Image: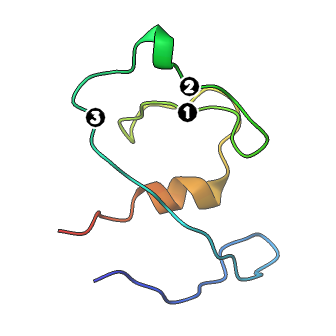
Amino acid sequence: MPDHTARPLAVDQRVEYGALFSGRCAEPLDRRRAFRPNEEIEAVHWWDLHEALPGCLNPLDAWLTRIPPPL
C-alpha cells in the first residue's frame, strides 16, 4: 500500500508533494522515438540506484526512487 504520509524532506523542512511514475520497457527506445526535452523535464536516465547520475540530482528525487513499487 502506498505511503501518502507527508514528510518534511527539504533542507528548510517544508513539506513537498509530488507524483512518481514507473513502468516497464521491453526494449530501449529507438532514435525515431527518442526522448525530447521540454519545459517540464530536461532529461531521462536509466539508473541502477548505485552508480552516480550525470548532472545534478535533487536529494528528494533520489529518495523517491528508493520507494518500492506496488506489487
Q: CA distance from mark 2 to mark 1?
A: 7 Å
SS state under label 1: loop
Residue at 50% over, 30% down: 45
* Residue density around tag 3, few if under 14, some if 14–19, many if 20 or more, within 10 Å: few
Mark 3 and mark 2: span between their CA atoms? 14 Å
Pinpoint residue 64: horizontal percent, then vertical percent. Answer: 49, 61
Give the residue displayed 33% in from the left and 48% down from the top.
Answer: 23
- Residue 39 quadrant: top right
- Measured as percent of width and height from the top left, residue 12 is found at 82, 76
Residue 28 x %, y % = 33, 21
Name the N-terminal-most of marks 1 and 3. 3
Q: Is residue 10 above or below residue 2?
A: above
Q: Amino acid at mark 2?
A: Phe
Label 1 neighbourhood size at 10 Å, few (<14), some (14-19), many (20+)? few
Hey, which quadrant is residue 10 in on the image?
bottom right
Evaluate if marks 1 and 3 touch, with contact meaning CB atoms under 8 Å apart: no
Q: Amino acid at mark 1?
A: Val
Number of the label disc, if any, that sits on residue 25 = 3
Closer to us: mark 2 or mark 1? 2
Per the rendering, the mark at residue 35 is 2
In primary-sequence order, the first of circles 3 and 2 is 3
* Disc 2, SS: loop
Asked whether, in this view, residue 37 is left or right of residue 20, the answer is right
Placement of 34 over or under 67, stated as above or below: above
Residues at marks 1 and 3, CA–CA distance in whole angstroms:
13 Å
* SS class, disc 3: loop
Quadrant assignment for the C terminus: bottom left
Considering depth in this image, is 31 or 13 the residue closer to the camera?
A: 31
Question: What residue is shown with label 1?
Answer: 44
Q: Are marks 2 and 1 in contact (CB under 8 Å)?
A: yes
Identify the image quadrant of residue 50: top left
